[in-house]
Image: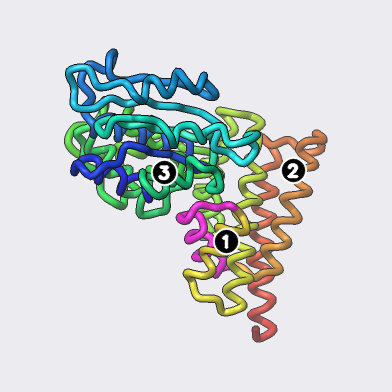
Amino acid sequence: MKPQEAVKQIKNGQGKGYIILAGEDDYRKKYTLKQIIAALQVEMPEMNLSEFEERPDTQSVLRAMETMPFLAAHRITILKNTDILGTQASGDLSAPFCKSNMPDCNYFIVVAQGNADKRKAYVKFVMQQGMFVECGPMQERELLAFVIQYAKHCNLLISAKNAQTLIDLSSGDINAIQNELDKLSVICRGEISAADIEAYAIKSMQYNVYKIHDFMVAGRPGQAYGIIQKMLEEDPNPIGFITLLSNNFRQMLVARACRDAHFPDSKTISHIMEATGAREFAARRALDHCKAFTASSIRRAILMFAKMDYSAKQGIIIMQTDLYALLVDIYRGDQKEKQERKKAGF
């Protein structure tokens, strides 16, 4: 079950008392938990909300689960940040919860560390009689919907195009997106415009990588130079910048290989995500941008980035004076190859 489905069912009065929030996206688990608590409208939380963490005493948790609500419709017991459902947990520490005498009006929510082991008795129990909610990374549409919905929560409107810009600026990091929207909610009124985002949103290093790449490919190195200079003024030795540039080309190499093998776009995007760990919007971008490069020119760029990274760490090159020249060499090398291939009739 997806998080939005679970929240919708609870809002409609169709929720089930036993809930597990599991998956790799910690922010999504926290956000879903917050939504569930809000949907249940717990009265007097000081009396009707009990929270435990990690590996508490089982009997203490059971007592909280089995206590009737105090002048309220529901009582919630939450076990957060626990590894008792993981594959590494010795034994089945969650098994006693299957046998609790929890009232039908109560809810017991377990927020697991990472994924849950579906072989464990309690996980099987919840999958059959409760709500097993999988909080994996948001796909592109889900991320767009989240940005638009969170902006609405902040009493603001944002178009799908501007929402995507904000996602790109934040490299798809939900925490960063939320922080930017919280900041824009103080500055903006009514609708978030592209000018607002450009003026006030913080650009991630990955976003700068994308912009530099776009300008270099488009034959506008002067604009790329402006971004590089501004970035180096803020941080003379931006750790990870070369790695991000290289990762950009690694994603394009996978995309180019799939394209040369005549894979359909949907299969190519899935393959990029699986092979490189890229988010969906980054995989789509790699598929689009690989069309301007040959596989050999992408491999050449990756090799040059590796040499550049080594030289920077050894102090052989200085980022402030050498970075731009090295990038020009990498991108012009690709253009030379295109010209030579064109002359040869390819």
In the displayed structure, 323 sits above or below 289; it is above
Q: Residue at x 48, y 36 (%)?
A: 26
Q: Which residue is mark 1?
A: 272
User: CA gap, disc 3 to disc 2?
Assistant: 49 Å
Query: Which residues lie in the magenta part?
Result: 277-292
Q: What is the three-letter code of the residue carrying label 2?
A: Asp
Residue 101 part of the magenta-drawn span: no
Q: Are marks 3 and 1 in contact (CB under 8 Å)?
A: no
> Is label 1 or label 2 in front?
1
The chosen color scheme is rainbow
Element at label 3: helix
Q: Are marks 3 and 2 in contact (CB under 8 Å)?
A: no
Q: Quadrant of residue 169?
A: top left
Q: What is the three-letter code of the residue carrying label 1?
A: Ile
Q: What is the three-letter code of the residue carrying label 3?
A: Val
User: CA gap, disc 3 to disc 1?
Assistant: 34 Å
Q: Which residue is mark 2?
A: 309
Q: Residue 255 bears which disc, if any?
A: none
Image mark count: 3
| Quadrant where the image shows the C terminus | bottom right
Q: Nearer the viewer, residue 328 or 95?
A: 95
